């Protein structure tokens, strides 16, 4: 089995069902994707040299954090 479960969409009650049998890390949906898109872009750019790829810098996170 796994020691850690990393996700971006876990529900509140699922934390309790784990009952300390596994460590759960909830990184947030947008927060997890913002770095993955760069990795996928880099991989595809090297794999498909004859295709023009464009990486968007648009921020589509619907959540705003305020200090």
Image (cartoon, rainbow, N blue to C red):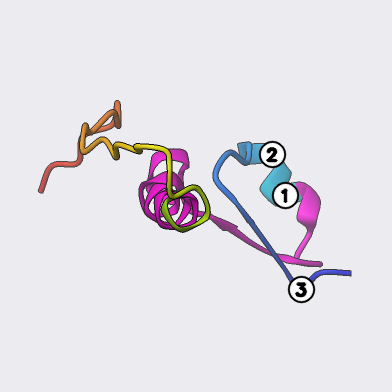
> Mark 1 and 2 residues: CB-CB less than 8 Å, in contact?
yes
Rendered residue at 29%/40% (across/down): 55
For disc 2, the marked residue is 13
User: 30 and 4: which one is in front?
Assistant: 30
Q: Check the image and report above or below for 24 versus 13.
A: below
Real-space Cα distance between discs 1 and 3? 16 Å
As drawn, the label of residue 16 is: 1
Residue 3 spot, x, y in % from top left: 76, 73
Q: Quadrant of the N terminus?
A: bottom right
Q: Is residue 8 left or right of residue 61?
A: right
Residue 63 spot, x, y in % from top left: 28, 31
> Mark 1 and 3 residues: CB-CB less than 8 Å, in contact?
no
Decide whether the magenta segment is chiefly helix, strand or loop.
helix
Numbered disc 2: secondary structure: helix
User: 55 and 48: which one is in front?
Assistant: 48
For disc 3, the marked residue is 3
User: 58 and 22: which one is in front?
Assistant: 58
Rendered residue at 69%/39% (across/down): 13
Q: Residues within 10 Å of mark 3 (few under 14, many from 20)?
A: few
User: Which segment is the magenta one?
Assistant: 17-44
- Answer with mark 3 or mark 2, whichever residue precedes in sequence: 3
Q: Which residue, as the protein is rendered here, is positioned at the far left?
A: 67
Eye-nearest disc, 3 or 2 = 3
């Amino acid at each position: 089995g796994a020691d850690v479960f990393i996700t971006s969409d876990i529900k509140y009650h699922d934390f309790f069902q784990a009952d300390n049998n596994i460590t759960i890390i909830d990184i947030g949906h947008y927060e997890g994707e913002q770095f993955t898109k760069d990795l996928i872009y880099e991989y595809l750019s090297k794999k498909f040299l004859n295709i023009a790829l464009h990486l968007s810098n648009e921020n589509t996170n619907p959540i705003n954090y305020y200090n």
